[in-house]
């Protein structure tokens, strides 16, 4: 390498020739940049999937709350006798096992036999192409991916005696998400009293 010496006002300045990036340095920096961008795209994909999962989780939560409100409203309005707020196997009106998520039947209570006879699947309504909710172009999505189980059990005190005025309610919503191959579950557990 040649060194240029310039004398200015009795100060010697050594100049080296300007050097650029080598081809290897450019290739390595492009590889690092590419890895970073691909990783960023992966994060966006995971965020989109998590958003979809959270929407389905919210729907499951709302379906469980809706079933509980149906039971409590029937009790509060005296539409049901206390003895009817049990599963069919125990002499009540609520179906055993998992059932498709149907709209309430003639009795207006979710999880009973008349829901199945009507056969109308619950739907999620989204605004249509115009973006306005509540008009004729709304999109109705059936909630066929969800199943609901309502379990009503007696409650016992510390001595093992059944408390006749209190029942435990477990509402389980089971559904599949695009990212998971096994079913997810949302469980709502509460107690309901005979007294309003």
Image: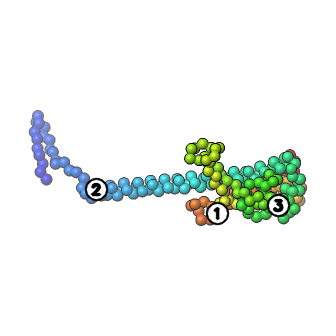
Q: CA distance from mark 3 to mark 1?
A: 24 Å
Mark 1, secondary structure of its residue: loop
Q: Using the image, determine if residue 120 lies above or below residue 9.
A: below
Q: Earlier in the sequence, mark 3 or mark 2?
A: 2
Q: Nearer the viewer, residue 45 or 31?
A: 45
Spot occupied by residue 17 in the image (x, y as percentages of width and height): 16, 48
Q: Which residue is mark 1?
A: 183
Name the mark nearer the viewer: 3 or 2.
3
The residue positioned 56% from the left and 61% from the top of the image is 179
Q: Earlier in the sequence, mark 1 or mark 2?
A: 2
Residue 178 appears anywhere in the view: yes
- Asked if residue 48 lies left or right of residue 88, the reply is left
Tally the marks. Answer: 3
Q: Looking at the rendered structure, which numbered label has been put on residue 87? A: 3
Q: Which residue is mark 2?
A: 25
Q: Nearer the viewer, residue 92 or 33?
A: 92
Residue most extreme to the top: 9
Q: Nearer the viewer, residue 76 or 39?
A: 76
- Asked if residue 37 lies left or right of residue 72, the reply is left
Q: CA distance from mark 3 to mark 2?
A: 72 Å
Task: Tell me if mark 3 has few (under 14), some (14-19) or many (20+) residues whose alpha carbon lies within 10 angstroms of its own.
Answer: some
Q: Earlier in the sequence, mark 3 or mark 1?
A: 3
The residue positioned 54% from the left and 56% from the top of the image is 49
Q: CA distance from mark 1 to mark 2?
A: 49 Å
- Determine the image quadrant of residue 96: bottom right
Color style of the picture: rainbow
Mark 2, secondary structure of its residue: helix
């Amino acid at each position: 390498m040649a060194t240029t010496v310039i004398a200015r006002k009795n100060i010697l300045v050594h100049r080296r020739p300007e050097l650029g990036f080598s081809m290897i340095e450019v290739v390595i920096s492009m590889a690092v940049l590419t890895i970073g961008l691909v990783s960023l795209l992966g994060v966006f994909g995971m965020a989109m999937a998590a958003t979809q999962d959270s929407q389905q989780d919210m729907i499951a939560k709302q379906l469980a709350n809706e079933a509980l409100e149906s039971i409590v409203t029937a009790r509060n309005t005296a539409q049901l006798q206390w003895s009817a707020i049990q599963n069919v196997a125990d002499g009540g009106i609520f179906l055993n096992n998992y059932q498709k998520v149907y709209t309430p039947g003639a009795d207006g209570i979710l999880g009973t036999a008349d829901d199945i006879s009507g056969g109308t699947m619950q739907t999620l309504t989204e605004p249509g192409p115009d973006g306005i909710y509540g008009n004729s172009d709304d999109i109705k999505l059936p909630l066929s991916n969800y199943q609901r189980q309502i379990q009503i059990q007696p409650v016992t005190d510390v001595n093992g005696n059944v408390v006749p005025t209190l029942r435990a309610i477990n509402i389980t919503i089971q559904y599949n998400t695009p990212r998971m191959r096994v079913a997810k579950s949302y469980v709502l557990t509460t107690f309901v009293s005979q007294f309003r």
